[in-house]
Image (cartoon, grey):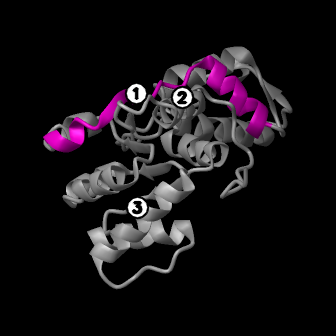
């Protein structure tokens, strides 16, 4: 099977497996079951990275919605991902996309689905699903399931809601193996990074880089929690202004 993109430097995080499981459930469902699944969770938990990687593994079409997209722009981007020149009208573009999904039998991943909800473009996604029968993976923020409940006909086509998992020590170890080649970061310091990150893959990555940079300034090629001392890590909060 030909893959539609190449991903490098992807750590084997728990949410990669969660995302792949979600899509596989829809792709291999019995014929009488609905074929859309929703993978949701807080920002920074690695959902988009997981989705892009899974798109390669599952040979799925992948689009990342933008806040400024119209319904027409969404269909244009789906067709661009399919390598199809869009026709002029939304009606014809919808037919083109549905036909390709049905013929190719490839899944569709829609990342940042919250933007399509805010643009009231949800029914276009349902139309693509109804016309093609394709497996569709919707990815969005923590409140996405509640937002989709406003569209009863859409909500009823969802096979499952699968929550993303917060990054844990195993994830942090995988990220350390992938990104930390300049400095050896000890397990106890890594555990502290996980506690500060509060589930965010992004914050773990930011802090691993911060630790490596600081350790190099200190002239160290290895560092543990004791050596790190009281130095600050990134928590997502802006630092308080110091008052003299």
Decide: few, some or many residues near mark 2? Use Cα within 10 Å; few <14, some 14-19, many ≥20: some
| Mark 2 / mark 1, whichever is N-terminal | 2
Of labels 3 and 1, the one closer to you: 3
Q: What element carries label 3?
A: helix
Which residue: 52% across, 38% down?
Answer: 46
Q: Nearest the camera: 130 or 171?
A: 130
Q: Nearest the camera: 221 or 28?
A: 28
Which residue: 42% across, 51% down?
Answer: 110
Decide: few, some or many residues near mark 3? Use Cα within 10 Å; few <14, some 14-19, many ≥20: many
Is disc 2 in contact with disc 1, using a CB cutoff of under 8 Å?
A: yes
Q: Residue 194 at what x, y percent from top left?
A: 56, 22
Marks 2 and 1, Cα distance to the nearest angstrom? 9 Å
Task: Specify whether 156 is left or right of 215.
Answer: left
Task: Specify whether 166 is left or right of 120.
Answer: right
Membership of 159 in magenta stretch: yes
Give residue 32's quadrant in the image: top left
Query: In the rendering, which numbered label is found on residue 162?
Result: 1
Q: What element carries label 2?
A: helix
Q: What stretch is highlighted in magenta?
A: 152-180
Which residue: 73% across, 31% down?
Answer: 176
Marks 3 and 2, Cα distance to the nearest angstrom? 24 Å
Of labels 3 and 2, the one closer to you: 3
Q: Residue 236 at what x, y percent from top left?
A: 43, 38
Task: Return the residue at label 3.
Answer: 98
Task: Return the residue at label 2.
Answer: 21
Membership of 149 in magenta stretch: no
Marks 3 and 1, Cα distance to the nearest angstrom? 25 Å
């Amino acid at each position: 099977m030909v893959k539609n993109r190449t991903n490098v430097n992807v750590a084997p995080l728990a949410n990669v497996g969660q995302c792949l499981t979600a899509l596989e459930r829809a792709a291999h469902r019995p014929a009488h079951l609905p074929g859309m699944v929703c993978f949701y969770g807080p920002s920074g938990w690695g959902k988009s990275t997981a989705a892009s990687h899974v798109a390669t593994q599952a040979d799925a079409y992948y689009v990342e919605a933008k806040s400024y997209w119209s319904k027409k722009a969404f269909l244009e981007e789906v067709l661009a991902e399919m390598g199809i020149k869009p026709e002029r009208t939304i009606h014809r573009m919808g037919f083109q996309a549905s036909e390709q999904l049905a013929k190719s039998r490839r899944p569709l991943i829609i990342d940042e689905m919250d933007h399509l909800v805010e643009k009231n473009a949800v029914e276009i996604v349902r139309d693509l699903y109804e016309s093609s029968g394709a497996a569709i993976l919707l990815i969005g923020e923590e409140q996405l399931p509640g937002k989709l409940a406003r569209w009863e006909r859409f909500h009823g086509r969802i096979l499952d809601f699968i929550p993303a998992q917060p990054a844990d020590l195993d994830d942090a170890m995988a990220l350390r193996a992938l990104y930390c080649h300049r400095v050896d970061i000890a397990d106890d310091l890594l555990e502290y990074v996980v506690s500060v990150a509060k589930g965010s893959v992004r914050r773990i990555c930011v802090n691993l880089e911060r630790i490596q940079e600081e350790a190099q300034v200190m002239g160290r090629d290895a560092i543990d929690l004791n050596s790190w001392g009281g130095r600050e890590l990134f928590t997502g909060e802006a630092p308080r202004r110091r008052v003299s």
